[in-house]
């Protein structure tokens, strides 16, 4: 959600900034800009629109220098216009700043600053910060930034350059990620590792509350009292290929198609065949701690929340302890009861989702052990959790989450296996599950073979105005996920429902124009789902059944059948979701939608 990049070194800052912004564009794409500090002060170029437009603007009106900052925006305060685009500058035009996050006391600050004579040119909360720095005391830019931040309530990742401090970028973070890229005679700052990868794989992840001073000679990390701090240099595990399209027309399709490999990667090194259990060293739970767990709470948002709902089935079945699954945004503002033996699991692809992070903090404050199921290595949730499981699914660039979902479910299966074996699941059951998981990447590969059939279905239903997705048991969350995928990238209104719940209201919507996607793999509730399909059929709905191979013929009931490989019920969601991802993708493409950058959305929601 919004991308920040900064560069200082001997190279041309603008080309590095624009290259970085292009890699960050999936995080926000309604406006963009850069500011470069050079002999003539601080110069900015910005516009409403995408990075391609910024490139053209810079070709027409170039700026040069060796130190600068850039931003790609997802609007929160103020419409996505050129004026509201970052970087923002102070009254004197000598300071430029880019910001991710929300300044919650912006209105109060703005009133006071205006009374003091500051002139505001935008509707953004961010501009208050640049005027605050302008009037803050201090001999250096970092002193002024620290002084200004003392007045700020809310969240920020910021990067600032100033005419008075040539060749220097000051960055700070609270609740919004910022990292430093450590190159050879050049340093970068960014909100996301993908922006620095063209230059270096060595990064320093800043902690909340850190302020860093970056010049061509090096960097210093300070706390809010300007005391110097030590921060480790980490290596980014992936390379530029992982964030390239690699011949696919869209990242979303690439990420759907690589799921056999990403599922394999989540499993790699974690299955102990002979023992019938999983190796999850990162959990940091002793056998005594595992035995003491009395309940599990899962907190997450969006697709990750759907994975959590599958996780409830997995964990209750394999571990035999109660699991509740909470919207992180709701959980964080409720009173947390101090129940001993609670383990809270935050599930997040990005590891930066603001609500999920705050829910994790609220759970910890209530005495819970907190674990993270996270994809992005070094992300805030990963670092703040007591332990966890990395998904190792590689960078997910498509705004609609796909491969993260399947890896999240696989990580939850591993967790269920591990905790289950600690708490009474017998070795034989464990070994059976291990052998099923070993085969899973191959089943995913086979499930992906339904693509031509799903593409044909997409042609048939691309003009639909509504769609209903029905499922039961572990496939009810898959229905929710299928509906979310369709609505967010094709803008067709879609609802996911527990199949039996449909007759308590939504059945009124069904007529011959309503496609109803029914999840009907072979599992203990299959016959129940078939009854629900009959109810749809009786009202003229068009049924697309997602079933499993060898599951009998549904052609008397369903208008279309798509069969994925048969699998045990707890594993089925990893397979049944694949046709739904493909259906949403192909419908969106046929409708001419911008699949990787759906309207109003952005990857990684770092505001609440
Ligand atoms: C939907 C989607 C979102 C995310 C949600 C949580 O396709 O991508 O619903 O799942 O914003 O994001 P993470 O998993 O990064 O916490």
Image (cartoon, rainbow, N blue to C red):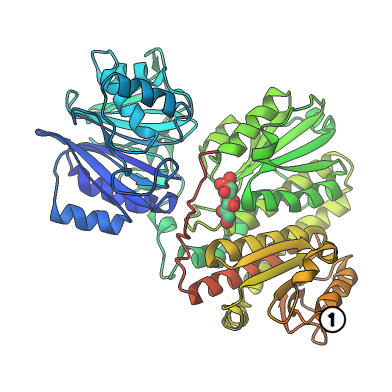
Judging depth in this view, the residue of 106 and 440 nearest the camera is 106
Q: Residue at x 14, y 56 (%)?
A: 60
Judging depth in this view, the residue of 352 and 608 nearest the camera is 608
Q: Give x and y (percent) for residue 521.
A: 79, 70
Look at mark 1 in the image and give the residue it sits on. 538
Q: Residue at x 24, y 17 (%)?
A: 140
- Per the image, label 1 sits on a secondary structure element best described as helix
Q: Residue at x 77, y 77 (%)?
A: 549
Mark 1 beta carbon near ligand 1 (under 8 Å):
no
Can residue 506 be spotted in the picture? yes
Q: Which quarter of the picture shows residue 488?
A: bottom right
In the displayed orientation, state which residue is furthest to the front: 115
Q: Give x and y (percent) for residue 36.
A: 20, 39
Q: Give x and y (percent) for residue 18.
A: 27, 50
User: Going by the image, does 114 lie left or right of 465?
Assistant: left
Can residue 198 be spotted in the picture? no
């Amino acid at each position: 959600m919004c991308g920040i990049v900064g560069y200082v070194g001997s190279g041309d800052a603008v080309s590095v900034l624009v290259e970085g912004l292009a890699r960050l564009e999936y995080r926000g794409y309604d406006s963009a800009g850069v500011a470069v500090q050079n002999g003539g002060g601080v110069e900015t170029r910005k516009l409403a629109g995408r990075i391609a437009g910024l490139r053209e603007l810079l070709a027409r009106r170039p700026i040069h220098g060796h130190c600068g900052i850039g931003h790609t925006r997802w609007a929160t305060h103020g419409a996505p216009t050129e004026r509201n685009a970052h970087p923002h500058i102070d009254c004197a035009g000598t300071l430029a700043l880019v910001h991710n996050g929300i300044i919650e006391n912006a209105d109060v600050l703005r009133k006071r600053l205006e009374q003091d004579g500051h002139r505001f040119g935008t509707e953004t909360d961010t501009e208050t910060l640049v005027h605050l720095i302008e009037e803050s005391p201090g001999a250096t830019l970092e002193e002024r930034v620290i002084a200004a931040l003392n007045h700020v309530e809310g969240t920020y990742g910021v990067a600032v350059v100033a005419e008075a401090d040539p060749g220097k970028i000051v960055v700070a973070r609270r609740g919004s990620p910022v990292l430093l890229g450590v190159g050879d005679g050049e340093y970068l700052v960014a909100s996301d590792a993908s922006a620095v990868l063209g230059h270096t794989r060595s990064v320093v992840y800043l902690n909340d509350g850190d302020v860093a001073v970056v010049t061509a000679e090096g960097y210093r990390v300070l706390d809010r009292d300007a005391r110097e701090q030590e921060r480790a240099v980490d290596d980014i595990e992936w390379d530029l290929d992982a964030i390239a399209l690699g011949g696919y027309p869209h990242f979303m399709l690439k990420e759907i198609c690589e799921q056999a490999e990403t599922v394999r990667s989540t499993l790699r090194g974690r299955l102990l065949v002979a023992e019938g259990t999983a190796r999850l060293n990162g959990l940091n739970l002793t056998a005594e701690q595992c035995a003491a767990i009395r309940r599990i709470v899962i907190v997450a948002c969006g697709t990750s929340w759907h994975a959590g709902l599958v996780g409830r089935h997995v964990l209750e079945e394999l571990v035999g302890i109660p699991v509740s699954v909470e919207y992180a945004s709701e959980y964080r503002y409720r009173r947390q009861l101090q129940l001993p033996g609670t383990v809270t699991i935050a599930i997040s692809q990005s590891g930066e989702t603001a609500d999920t992070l705050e829910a994790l903090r609220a759970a910890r404050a209530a005495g819970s052990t907190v674990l993270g199921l996270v994809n992005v290595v070094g992300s805030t949730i990963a670092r703040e959790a007591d332990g966890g499981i990395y998904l190792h699914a590689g960078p997910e660039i498509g705004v609609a989450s796909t491969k993260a979902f399947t890896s999240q479910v696989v990580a939850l299966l591993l967790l269920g296996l591990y905790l289950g074996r600690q708490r009474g699941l017998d070795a034989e059951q464990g070994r059976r599950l291990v052998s099923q998981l070993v085969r899973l990447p191959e089943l995913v590969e086979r499930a992906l073979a339904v693509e031509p059939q799903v593409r044909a279905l997409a042609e048939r239903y691309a003009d639909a105005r509504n769609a209903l997705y029905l499922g039961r048991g572990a496939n009810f969350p898959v229905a929710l996920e299928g509906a979310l995928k369709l609505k967010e990238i094709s803008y067709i209104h879609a609802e996911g429902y527990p199949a039996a719940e449909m007759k308590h209201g939504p059945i009124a919507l069904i007529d011959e124009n309503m496609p109803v996607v029914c999840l009907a793999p072979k599992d203990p509730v299959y016959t129940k789902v078939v009854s629900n399909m009959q109810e749809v059929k009786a009202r003229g709905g068009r049924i697309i059944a997602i079933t499993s191979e060898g599951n009998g013929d549904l052609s008397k009931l369903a208008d279309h059948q798509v069969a994925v490989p048969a699998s045990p019920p707890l594993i089925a969601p990893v397979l049944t979701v694949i046709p739904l991802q493909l259906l949403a993708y192909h419908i969106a493409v046929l409708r001419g939608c911008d699949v990787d950058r759906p309207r109003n959305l952005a990857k990684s929601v770092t505001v609440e």
